Amino acid sequence: MAQYAILLYAKAPADADDLTPEQREAHDRHGQDVEKLGGTMLTAFALQPSTTATSIRGDAITDGPFIDAKEVVAGVYVIEAPDLDAALEIARRNPITQQGGGVEVRPVAGGFFGG
């Protein structure tokens, strides 16, 4: 099966601590539903708010996200799915799409697993 990264976008600063218990529950359920939808969750991470980001461009190091935007990457998870259509169906059902955010699905080109 192919691997797909699903990036979660939310309104800046995207603080996971601001989620209601119901919203957290919806995300937990989605994680459990991935297998029911034909995929396998390989890894998932919520990110700290964008206000905690530090960006590097060349030799310059600055506080804050890489760009100033209304939406920021709030989390990412990687799934295995039979094909792009299955990955899109899994991503479409992510609760963030109903909570004012969105998702981006990208095929994984390769990876490194340190030892």
Image (spheres, rainbow, N blue to C red):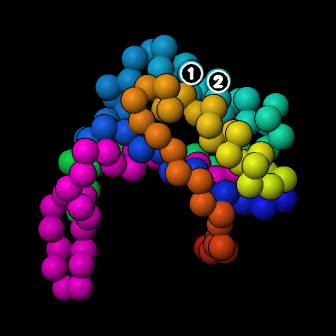
In reply to whether residue 47 is colored magenta, the answer given is no
Position of residue 17 measured from the top left corner of the image (x, y, whole percent): 34, 29
Residue at 68 percent across and 46 percent down: it is 88
Residue at 62 percent across and 37 percent down: it is 92
Q: Which mark is residue 29?
A: 2
Range drawn in magenta: 55-80
Q: Is residue 2 above or below residue 6?
A: below
Position of residue 114 measured from the top left corner of the image (x, y, whole percent): 61, 73
| Element carrying mark 2 | helix
Q: Is residue 46 above or below residue 24?
A: below
From this viewpoint, is residue 73 visible? yes
Position of residue 84 measured from the top left corner of the image (x, y, whole percent): 74, 55
Left or right: 63 in relation to 6: left
> CB atoms at circles 1 and 2 under 8 Å apart?
yes
Residue at 60 percent across and 27 percent down: it is 28
Left or right: 72 in relation to 114: left
Q: Which residue is mark 1?
A: 26
Residue at 31 percent across and 45 percent down: it is 71
Image quadrant holding the C terminus, namely bottom right
**Where, by quadrant of the figure, is residue 65 drawn?**
bottom left
Q: Crowding at label 2, few (<14), some or many (≥20) Cα neighbours within 10 Å?
A: few
From this viewpoint, is residue 80 visible? no
Q: Which mark is residue 53?
A: none
Question: In the rendered structure, which amino acid carries the disc numbered 2?
Answer: Arg
Image quadrant holding the N terminus, namely bottom right
In reply to whether residue 75 is colored magenta, the answer given is yes
Question: In the rendered structure, which amino acid carries the disc numbered 1?
Answer: Ala
